[in-house]
Amino acid sequence: MARFVFPLQPLLDERRRTEEEKQLAFVRVKAARDERSRELDRIAGALRARGRALHECAMTGSAANLRLYDANLRYLERALQSHERCSAESAQAFDLAAAELLDANRERRLIEKLKERRFQEFEREEARRDELELDEANARRR
């Protein structure tokens, strides 16, 4: 019996490698996005806590403490805005990496389906040859 050889195997191997690279890139971008999201949540929580502390200080604290809380709140608001911009950029990078991974997956599956079809054709052809050989052998015996 002949051995099945897929002529596009190097292309399929390359598509698999490309997909693996895209998968790794996607994981890195996702981790960065998640880290930025956690940092954003942390800053937002600190901002809320300092806001409550400012309110309490306004009721009972000194003017110097009020200025310190106010400066800290302004700093946290700027940090929050900066992290929101970075988070938006991370979301765009995540979407791009996800789209690239999806494309790489689609391209690999396309070649794999072609390989499957070619293998099925090969098996049918082998079965037909075996049947012809059996028919010839039977015809010679008669």
Image (tube, helix red, strand yellow):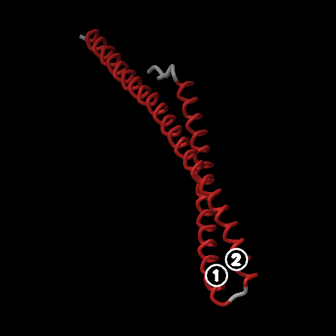
Location of residue 112 by image quarter: top left
Q: Give whichever of 102, 6 is nearer the camera.
A: 102
Q: Residue furthest front?
A: 63
Mark 1 or mark 2: which comes first in sequence?
A: 1
Q: Label 2: state its secondary structure.
A: helix
Q: On the rendered image, what quadrant is the C terminus found in?
A: top left
At label 1, which amino acid type do we have? Ala
Vertical arrangement, residue 57 with respect to residue 107, above or below: below
Q: Label 1: state its secondary structure.
A: helix
In x, y percent, where is residue 80? 63, 62
Vertical arrangement, residue 48 with respect to residue 28, above or below: below
Q: Give whichever of 140, 56 is nearer the camera.
A: 56
**Residue at x-position 73% and y-position 86%:** 62
CA distance separating discs 1 and 2: 8 Å
In x, y percent, where is residue 3? 48, 22
Q: Are marks 1 and 2 in contact (CB under 8 Å)?
A: yes
Q: Residue furthest right?
A: 64
Location of residue 74 by image quarter: bottom right
Vertical arrangement, residue 57 with respect to residue 51, above or below: below
Q: Is residue 82 left or right of residue 110?
A: right
Q: Which residue is mark 2?
A: 69
Q: Which residue is mark 1?
A: 53
At label 2, which amino acid type do we have? Tyr
Q: Residues within 10 Å of mark 1 (few under 14, many from 20)?
A: some
Location of residue 93 by image quarter: top right
